[in-house]
Amino acid sequence: MADIENLWDVVPTEAGDRFLSMLPTWHVYERACEYFTFTHGIEQVYTTVRNLKDDLRHYQPQYLISVPLVYETLYRGIQKQISTSSTIRKLIAVSFIKVSLAYMEFKRIYEGLYLTRNTEQPSYLASMLDCLWARIIAAILWPLHVLAKKLVYQKIRSAIGISKAGINGGGNLPMHLDKFFEAIGVTVQNGYGLTESSPVVACRRPYCNVSNVKKFSKRISSCTLATDFAKPIALSKKRVIGSIGHPIQHTEFKVVDSETGEVLPPGTRGIVKVRGPQVMKGYYKNPLATKQALDEDGWLDTGDIGWIAPHHSAGRSRRCGGVIVLEGRAKDTIVLSSGENVEPLEIEEAAMRSSLIQQIVVDQRRLAAIIVPNKDEVLQAAKVSTIVDPDAVDLGRDKMTSLLYEELSKWTSECSFQVGPILVVDEPFTIDSGLMTPTMKIRRDQVVAKYKEEIANLYK
């Protein structure tokens, strides 16, 4: 009920709007969306992975309710369509997308929406020069961006069929997808929640309430981010890319040290905790598990690693204060023999930008990667690189592994750590095989357990 009452602030729907969803109806994310749609007189259409593309085109929904894998699938479909176009069309589309990505990057700078963990306040002079430079570059790129919208993005948006926004939940949206959809003009509102919180606790609005963000920052001195949003005063469609936005109404967030439980200041990474009317009373007939998840003050330990963006009164991050950023699950953190911590999600998201990699899991105990290849794309890449003959119909395992390792190294070169050996597997991770959840998140432990012996052999 708390979510139903407060989600309109996130999704300002109108009676007659149409939602398209492909999640199992018993999942808490889907169930909350259903109750919300029925409460507001919205039409709900159900689809499947197989029928998604056709149903998007046929029903032209105002909103798509889905998970990161679906947006990844849409992204890859667009990229494949571009790559199989004629040389001229491909060159035009790729060039326009690069221009638009650059344009949006500079636009974020002068609009104050450039996300940072840095708590140091920039000087007003430096901020003015930075914003001025960003405006000049953005102004130069703007005509090409507008042309791209008319020549390329309009067709893409028409094919996708989402007229208002895609709502992402059930997992964090990778940064490259976030930036891509922003560049082509498709609004994606990244949200966050857990079954234990019924589920929504935070989401990016289709606007940024600047007035309330400033009020937030004054309360951040206690290092706890609380929300008590009234109706928006100043609406401007600004979203902080890379974040899950602000908490929904009547919901509080804080970030604590994993060992001491001490509340951490904005910009510092730690364990995310949440409190609000949507948080559960406890686990059914399981007081021990309840005590581990909930403290006496009602704070729920989410098990996620994240941080709260610091407030800056000037500069490129002046409108980011108070948004929440997630960086992975605490239980997935890899602790190296040197004592350093590695978040596998960073490596996996970087690797998934490659069209050659369909799925990837970085082993939690060793920095090995289990990869499901996109065989058609790998074979095509091998032909282009003259690794095999132009008329080849298959690629040997050794050549495929070598090609995928080079590809992985290229896309993860800017990550904090590099992956060691890789294991190439033929069988995709699916819900039916038990290697994915119903919301299409990979079950990391199950995948690693299944290929435990093969991973061990990589180190022999």
Image (spheres, rainbow, N blue to C red):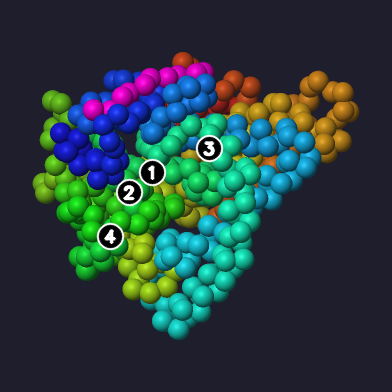
Picture residue at 38% right of the left edge, 34% below the top: 63
- Which residues lie in the magenta part? 41-51
Q: Do the residues labelled 2 and 4 touch (CB within 8 Å)?
A: no
Tell which tag, 2 or 3, sits nearer the viewer: 3
* Residue tagged 1: 189
Disc 1 marks a residue whose amino acid type is Gln
Q: Nearer the viewer, residue 119 or 320?
A: 320
Q: Nearer the viewer, mark 1 or mark 3?
A: 3
On the question of residue 380 being in view, the answer is yes
Compute the Cα span from label 1 to label 4.
19 Å
Left or right: where 38 falls relative to 365:
left
Label 4 secondary element = loop
User: In the picture, which quadrant includes the C terminus?
Assistant: top right
| Residue position for label 4 | 234
Q: Mark 4 is on which residue type?
A: Ala
- Pointer 3 with pointer 4, Cβ within 8 A: no
First of labels 1, 3 by sequence position: 3
- Residue 34 figure quarter: top left
In the rendered image, which residue does mark 2 sit on? 205
Residue highlighted by disc 3: 157
Which is the main secondary structure of the residues drawn in magenta? loop
The crowding category of the residue bearing disc 4, from other C-alpha atoms within 10 Å (few below 14, some 14 to 19, many at least 20), is few
Q: Quadrant of the N terminus?
A: top left
Give me the disc on residue 242: none
